Image (cartoon, grey):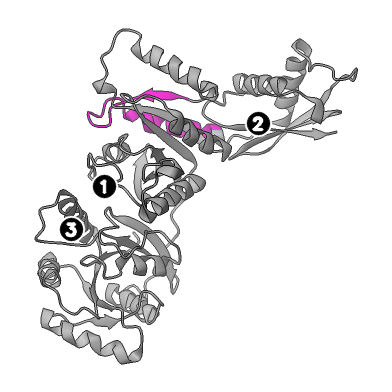
Amino acid sequence: MKRPLIAIIGRPNVGKSTLFNRLLNQRYSIVDPQEGITRDRIYGEMEWCGQVLKFIDTGGYISDDNDRFNEAIRMQAEDAIDEADLVLFMVDGKQGVMPNDKILAQFIRESNRPYLIVVNKCDGYKTDDFINQFYELGFDNLIPISALNGRLTGNLLDEILNKLDILNIQKLEKLKDSIRLTIVGMPNVGKSTLTNALLKRERSIVNPIAGTTRDAIDANLKWYGHEVTLVDTAGLRKLAKLKDRVEYYSSLRAKRAIDKSNIVLMVIDAIKGFNRQDKNIVDEVINKGKGLVFIVNKWDLIEKKTDTAQLFQKEIRRKFKALDHYPIIFISALTKQRIHRVLEIAIQVYKKSRVLIPTKKLNDAIIDIVSKNPPQASNGKQIQIKYVTQVSFEPTVIALYSNYPDKIQINYRRFLDNQFRKKFDLEGVPIFLSFRHK
């Protein structure tokens, strides 16, 4: 049985994201007094009375505005209603009935979806009368809550179960874990366009204006039997260039998405090339031990000769030597050129990141490596590496036991890293060598 999907709909600033975060008990969506913070559909799951419920947070619905962003937000909200099993129509009890509430009420009626009217900002029992003014919308099923302090949200969840008629249904089984692929990069490099191209639908809002995506947005897909969660994130700038607190929180969401991911898809703009901020992002991904696939987008806009891609790749690796160990793909998310390679290579890297190399093979390898190129002696002391074993994967950590681990020079450590990669095919996977005293 599929998990019931509940869409939270309403005009701007009625508290949709606050309720969404409250129900999930995490700060999934960015909350700010400024209108229009949430733009895309944001999904999250929680459990209530043994039932797993999936919620969608949507942007504020404005019906009579010709702004491109508002038009895209309306489409996202309407798509959420279309796919939902139940709609939570959220209104502001303190402000009362507003024109956009009436228009949205009519739209929900025409959708023929089961619904509940959630009257927010009823912070105490004396404010529960706020619900009476909303009967003019022609609905019953009005429920007062306070998303900010959590008042009566338990009653709301009980009513959701009643409305969906799943109280007496067998508890839902947990879905098998999916592979989390997080798309990162600077603003306007085409992350949301790539997300939509891989999903084959308009999941994220795409706009030439930098900073369109603000939250980290999850979407699920299947790829040859693999359950994949694709995470679109906000563009990452230098801390000094963040303009306001919304952009700062967007950056935090993107970094948290990296922490939770299995593989990171790092996207750059082919026209702008590889710059220092791209290097900083790659550094952060590698230091966190995440598998990495490097993607050069907008390749359709580059004038090409026979060896253009090869030269571009050499230039990237000249600027950042560590990328010698990670796959680089040239794509166009807009024209869908070679985007099938993105998931194909990401799954390959994921499988490599979860390999536990047998200890015997590692020790056979180190004997061969050291016999051909032993570590340089230090202060007359001969350095020996006695034993090697892999102690973890995701991240891949290899422990090397030596008589003088602190005296092994950095150049030799890099040499060992390269040798292990060649012998065990670990392209795309960060390796951490842990030198320990025997």
Q: Which residue is mark 3?
A: 78
Q: Which residue is mark 2?
A: 357
Residue at coordinates 25% horizontally, 80% vertically from top-left?
Answer: 94
Query: From where the camera sits, is residue 164 visible?
Result: yes
Q: Quadrant of residue 196?
A: top left
Decide: is 277 above or below 59.
above
Q: Is tag 3's residue or tag 2's residue first in the polypeptide sequence?
A: 3
Decide: is 363 above or below 438.
above
Front residue of this view, candidates 99 and 339? 99
Task: Name the element at disc 3.
Answer: helix
Does the stretch in magenta take in 351?
yes
**Real-space Cα distance between discs 3 and 1?**
12 Å
Amino acid carrying label 1: it is Arg
Instruction: Say few, some or many: other residues with alpha carbon within 10 Å of mark 2 (under 14 / 14 to 19 / 20 or more).
Output: some
Q: Which residue is mark 1?
A: 203
Q: Position of residue 92 (x, y in %)?
A: 24, 76
Q: Of circles 2 and 1, which is in front?
A: 1
- Which residues make up the magenta segment? 327-352
Front residue of this view, candidates 265 and 317? 317
**Real-space Cα distance between discs 2 and 1?**
39 Å
Residue farthest toward the right in the current orientation of the protein:
380
Decide: is 60 above or below 220.
below
Front residue of this view, candidates 339 and 50? 339
Q: Is tag 2's residue or tag 1's residue first in the polypeptide sequence?
A: 1
